[in-house]
Amino acid sequence: MFSWAACSRKGHRFTKDGGVATREIEDIFADILERAKALDPASTRKWFEELTVLHLDGGSLGIGCPDEASVQFLQDHCKGSFTRAAQQITGHLIAVDFNIRSDGQPDTHRRSLQPGLRLHPDYTFENFVVGPSNRLAHASCIAVSQSPGNTYNPLFVYGSSGLGKTHLLHAVCFEAQRRLENAIIQFLSCENFVNRFIRAIEEGNLAGFQSQFRTVDILVIDDVQFLREREHSQEEFFHTFNALYNNGKQIILSADSPPGKIPSLEERLISRFNWGLVARIDPPSYETRVAIVQKKAHLRGLDISEEIAGYVARKVQANIRELEGALTTIYAVANTTGQPIDLELVQTALEGQIKASVRHISIIDIIEVVTSYFGVRLADLQSKKRSQSIAEPRQICMYLARNLTRHSLGEIGGHLGGRDHTTVMHACGKINHAKETDPKMNALLNELTEQITQAPQR
Ligand code: ADP
Ligand code: MG
């Protein structure tokens, strides 16, 4: 039975019956929060200051969050670090729960989300830095979020990976939801759309699928290049598009290239995608990159000097996701060495990271590291064997390939014994869950990633 009696870290007093004074609970929670931040600086956000403790008893810690998006973020990214932090501070196994705090205070900034809409709390217009490279895309997203169905329809945003397409799409949803509380919004990746379509056919529930997508006010589909060579999905998407468009509903799409350049996309879809506004996002200029580094640092609760922001912006030019990766590395190094973030630390921290980011990682690199780590052969991974000793390395390969390369699910499955994309998706989900809940798996994945990214270039 859980008891606080033995728990007396850092001078917190616990009574025999498990009761803890409110003040003490707040102090303990403050310690847990600090520890959780230290355990995972990359996921730390400034708004963690707004988290409160709802209860701490009976082996369970309830954490109060400002809104639904922050609950989702914490659940997806921080459950592991908060659980470990709670355990380390109290010396007990504690189940951590995140919930919206209902303090009865009306809050105009509170973002309520319709059930099922999953949005990243960082991806708002407020957190988006506007520059010449993304001005048109940003302005058109704002226009559409203010008056869906009435300005540009469809809105098609395209640009290379890591330039902010998904960020803008989430921002439109936040803003539309804030302005039109009752608007029904469907936001999903094209991959998800296709998978749900396939599942609906398998389950004989096409009507359910169709009514789900054809009755919304705003349909947002990210990465529509995923439709290439998927004839049946294209057909279904065509009818969904028509139904929404004819009813004056808003359609927002993103892709890595303009409609006409998406391979094997049907002509009738290309023409429809061009009906509204097609907005391109280009790689950001130096000034925009500096502003983004500062914005991202601020979001994590840290202000860095212009000199350091400038250094990072000069070093990492290709894509903004890599800029963020650079910041994460800097924080991790500062955190483990306990040193202040100055130019010297930043230079040392980024040396390895930049080498890794310019390196092209192939599935073969990943397979080599994973097979040698687990002492299995490639033929085993490609075989039908399902024993844990083979299945786990195979699933880890799939997860790492998904995260470190740009291969599609199908291509990854092809390398690992001709498995289909649903198998790869399942594997990625499973390993991701294990990573979040099992510190050993997290450490293992970090180690393998390090070996893969630091292996000599072929
Ligand atoms: P894409 O969907 O185009 O591949 P994302 O929207 O996922 O790119 O963006 C990658 C990362 O870069 C995200 O963390 C996003 O917040 C950030 N980002 C991209 N553009 C900007 C910008 N203009 N301002 C702030 N952050 C940005
Ligand atoms: Mg994206």
Image (cartoon, rainbow, N blue to C red):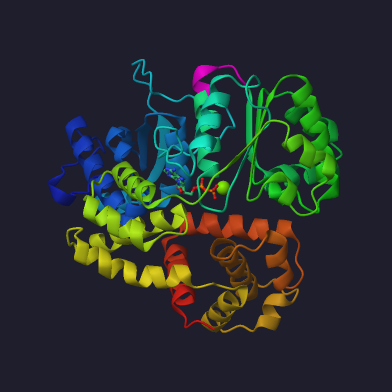
Residue at image point 72% right, 56% down: 422
Q: Is residue 106 left or right of residue 273?
A: left
Residue 5, horizontal then vertical, whole percent: 22, 46
Chain part drawn in magenta: 176-183
Between 269 and 47, which is closer to the camera in this rendering? 269
Q: Is residue 359 left or right of residue 410?
A: left
Q: Most extreme residue toward the front, as rendered?
A: 132
Residue at image point 31% right, 34% down: 51
Between 75 and 11, which is closer to the camera in this rendering? 75
Residue 65 quadrant? top left
> Does 435 sit above or below residue 450?
above
Q: Is residue 101 left or right of residue 248?
A: left
Q: Most extreme residue toward the left, as rendered?
A: 11
Residue at image point 50% right, 81% down: 457
> Does 424 sit above or below residue 113?
below
Q: Is residue 54 magenta?
A: no
Residue 106, horizontal then vertical, whole percent: 36, 15
Between 210 and 311, which is closer to the camera in this rendering? 311
**Res. 114 visible in picture:** no
